[in-house]
Amino acid sequence: MADSRIPAALREHVTHRAKNCCEYCYSQSRFAVQPFSIEHINPTSKGGLSTEDNLALSCQGCNNHKYNKTQGSDPISGQKTPLYHPRIHAWTDHFVWNEDYEPVWHK
């Protein structure tokens, strides 16, 4: 298995690039009750590397929900589809904020 340890300088770079916000739900780390993680977009268990382009700042909720998944079932078609990738996809094509200021998937 690949070494998933991430050097401190790279962690700092990823955090700065994300402006201290989760790259999945855009929650701000300063309001979180748990520390954010640097997560592998393509998990190390599936061959992902600890490179700048494969790392994202993630709140614990998003990190735990995504875990090591890279695909999900489309709720309309039932077909397998790639999960949101913060380096490739536009956030607004996948999510909206609801009236409670929580991100939700487009339907």
Image (spheres, grey):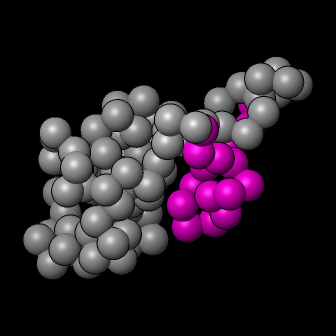
Camera sees residue 48: no
**Residue at (28, 65) in percent of width and height:** 20
Residue 55, compared with residue 1, is above or below; it is below
Work out whether residue 86 or residue 22 is closer to the camera in this orientation and state it. 22
**Residue at (67, 63) in percent of width and height:** 90
Work out whether residue 98 or residue 38 is closer to the camera in this orientation and state it. 98
Q: In which quadrant of the rendered image does the N terminus lie?
A: top left
Quadrant of res 19 = bottom left
**Residue at (77, 23) in percent of width and height:** 75
**Residue at (85, 24) in percent of width and height:** 76
Q: In which quadrant of the rendered image does the C terminus lie?
A: top right
**107 left or right of 57 in image:** right
Quadrant of res 59 = top left
Q: Specify the farthest residue to the front.
A: 99
Residue 35, x across and y down, in percent: 16, 47
Residue 106, x across and y down, in percent: 73, 39
Camera sees residue 29: yes
**Labels in figure, total:** 0
Residue 107, compared with residue 18, is above or below; it is above
Work out whether residue 85 or residue 104 is closer to the camera in this orientation and state it. 104
Magenta region includes residue 94: yes
**57 left or right of 96 in image:** left
Quadrant of res 29 = bottom left
Q: Specify the farthest residue to the right.
A: 77
Q: Specify the farthest residue to the left.
A: 8
Residue 13, x across and y down, in percent: 26, 78
Read off the magenta span: 80-98
Residue 79, x across and y down, in percent: 82, 27
